[in-house]
Amino acid sequence: MKNKYIAPILLGAGIALVLYSCGSTIPKNAEAVKNFDKAKYLGKWYEIARLDFKYEKGLNNVTAEYSLKDNGTIKVDNKGYNVRKDKWEQSIGKAKFVKKDNIAMLKVSFFGPFYAGYNVIAIDPDYKYALVIGESLKYMWILSRETSIPENIKMDYLKKAQEIGYDTSELVWVKHDRK
């Protein structure tokens, strides 16, 4: 008799896990950019700095290219050069807006139904430089349309990140050279 309850309980737990993984949050004291222009954000970005994590360890020349798909989602094409392996690595995923598409709070997936937060919390008026954070204090990126960023913008972004609680001394500053 008890065995007939196991399957519904496991199914319910599985559904709860999937629903949880589809949500996206933002760290305390952080706010996603409002009046976000999705069209201006599309295109190629160079990773200037990041908090390192296993999928980007050892990568230089890192770029992210965002393009609009027919179904309204955003294609995410990340590339980086693995110095140790002497080869290019690429990950293609998708991003969706969590609320409205004019609020820069997205969720991104590279692995099936599992999503992670992607929150643009600072961007200049010309969409040349961006500060992006994940859903926790473990993930942060500084992006630029060029392979460098002006010192004043870099300092503004670092200050903003520190105010939220990020340890910016842990940032990896990405090298960009011709490969």
Image (cartoon, rainbow, N blue to C red):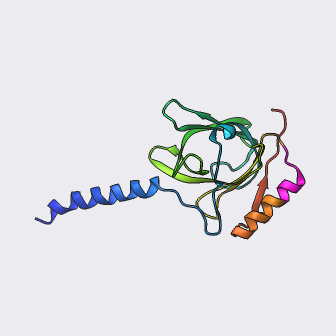
The quarter of the rendered structure image containing the N terminus is bottom left
Question: Residue 147 or 27: which is nearer the viewer?
Answer: 27
Residue 156 location in percent, x, y?
Answer: 82, 60
* Residue sitting at x 28%, y 55%: 11
Magenta stretch: dominant SS? helix
* Residue sitting at x 57%, y 38%: 74
Span colored in magenta: 148-155
Is residue 152 covered in magenta?
yes
Q: Is residue 163 left or right of residue 68?
A: right
For this orientation, the residue located farthest to the left is 1
* Residue sitting at x 69%, y 50%: 57
Residue 143 location in percent, x, y?
Answer: 75, 47
Residue 11 vs 178, above or below: the answer is below
Residue 72 vs 11, above or below: the answer is above
Residue 174 vs 6, above or below: the answer is above
Residue 24 location in percent, x, y?
Answer: 52, 56
Is residue 29 covered in magenta?
no
Picture quadrant where residue 178 is located: top right
Question: Residue 155 or 85: which is nearer the viewer?
Answer: 155
Question: Residue 3 or 118: which is nearer the viewer?
Answer: 118
Q: Is residue 150 visible?
A: yes
Residue 113 location in percent, x, y?
Answer: 44, 46
* Residue sitting at x 77%, y 49%: 124
The quarter of the rendered structure image containing the C terminus is top right
Q: Is residue 65 visible?
A: no
Tag count? 0
Residue 79 vs 14, above or below: the answer is above
Question: Residue 163 or 86: which is nearer the viewer?
Answer: 163
For this orientation, the residue located farthest to the right is 151
